[in-house]
Amino acid sequence: MESKAKIFTLIIVGILIGSGINQYINDKDLDGVSNKNDAFPNDGTEWDDYDKDGIGDNADPDDDNDGYNDTVDFFPNNAAEQEDNDLDGIGNNADPDDDNDGYNDTEDINPLNDLALNFNLEWIELIDKQNNRADTPVIFYLYQNNESIHRFDNDNKPWKVPWQEKFYLNSKFEMNIPDNIELHTFSLIAVNYKFRSAEEFDISDSNDSYRKIINYNLSTNSWENGNNGTLDGTLDNLNENNDARIFIGIETYNFGYLKTYDWKFNNIDYQIRYNFDPTTYSFYKSQPHLISEYEDYLSFVTIDELAIIEIGIELREMSKEKGFDNLTEVNFVMSFTQSLKYSEDNVTSGVGEYPRYPIETLIDQTGDCEDTSALLISLLESLGYETAMILIPEAWDGYGHAAVGVSIEGASGVNYILNEKQNNEVSYYYAETTAPGWKLGEIPDLDSNEAYVYEV
């Protein structure tokens, strides 16, 4: 029995040795790629060399040798293509419509962007007082090709505009326009919206009509008055007792990327508008969105992104105008982030976990707790505040949660202390980002108080 066991053992060992020899013969570097298919059979870290330059694809920063680093090349294995502006899977060189707006690049005035116009009626002044009342009802109509395309009003009601003083409207309208037409002509009509006999105000410098004809040129991104100007009915030199002045701004923007954010802070309404660069959005969408460790969430913080910096500056200007101190400013920036719609990744992205970069969160105007936390950190860091990412794995039964920590004097409430036993102790106060109303130091009712805190 003993000799049989030895024989059996020797047979097994022989089989294993034979298997190893056979594998070595077929895959010398043991990288899982057979020698005949391995461009580097003696290097277990390389097996392909797409551009045949002697550098393996894993080490080669430019696999197709087209002059574009693989990190920015949408087609790293296609030397004929590098960019995909509309993310349709067709490279810009082969794609006949790079912005996917329905107009061929050969006729598209801006082939990389779907263009739109933004009209802003800023103020009106009624020059001639027509009766003894303090004000009169006013609305506006915008026409193109004899078709009414928009009515400017005060929430479906006329504005009550006082006579002979400047009245601020700040009424905006945005419209997508054909990108293959250079000149777009509009008519603006100002109406004294009286119950029985509506009449037009004279806002034109022409003797032919009270209506102002506006010719907007897409190639120059301007109209007769540049980007903005005053329409003045007194310039026709006729005294018809119905003259008015209107200040209007018109600008070109990239359709789908001009975003408006409305929110409340301490019961006061605020608004920010920002026109994002679509290529920046495309860049972040093309980046990896993978998490292998908790600390990887910090890689989605983008402090130096221009749009983040400019939005942060606008928030700071609002804060200065209101005289906020630092703590109130932090709560103000929190309220902006909290105003974005909360959504689960599996609903908006079709996957269980899809961490967004702040630009994605801002343009999509939605995200989950990790997304809005990365956004708040980016904004606060760009304004000079010290922050941290707070991750609570067992926040609720089966659910984790992310929030932000802010180190700031004068704060109170829930905080996490780092380096507690060292001389550089730092307290990060909890900042909730997913719902309006939470202030710094306030925390939802969680099942766990334990958290991972990662300083930025």
Image (tube, grey):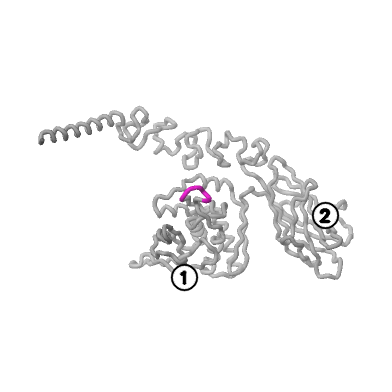
Main secondary structure along the magenta-highlighted residues: loop
Labelled disc at residue 216: none
**Dot 2 surroundings within 10 Å: few (below 14), some, or many (20 or more)?**
many
Taking the view exactly as shown, the residue that stands out farthest to the front is 1
Tell me the element at label 1: loop
- Secondary structure under tag 2 reads loop
The amino acid marked with disc number 1 is Glu
Determine whether 94 is above or below 453 in the image: above
Task: State the residue in front, 266 or 348.
Answer: 348
Is residue 374 placed above or below 63 in the rendered structure? below
What residue is shown at x 56% (from left), y 52% (from top)? Answer: 364
Res. 339 in view: yes
Q: Residue 394 appears at what percent x and percent y? A: 40, 60
In this figure, which residue is indicated by the disc labeled 2?
A: 204
Residue 348: say if magenta.
yes
Q: Which residue is mark 1?
A: 409
Q: Which residues are magenta?
A: 347-352
Mark earlier in primary sequence (2, 1): 2
On screen, residue 68 above or below 127:
above
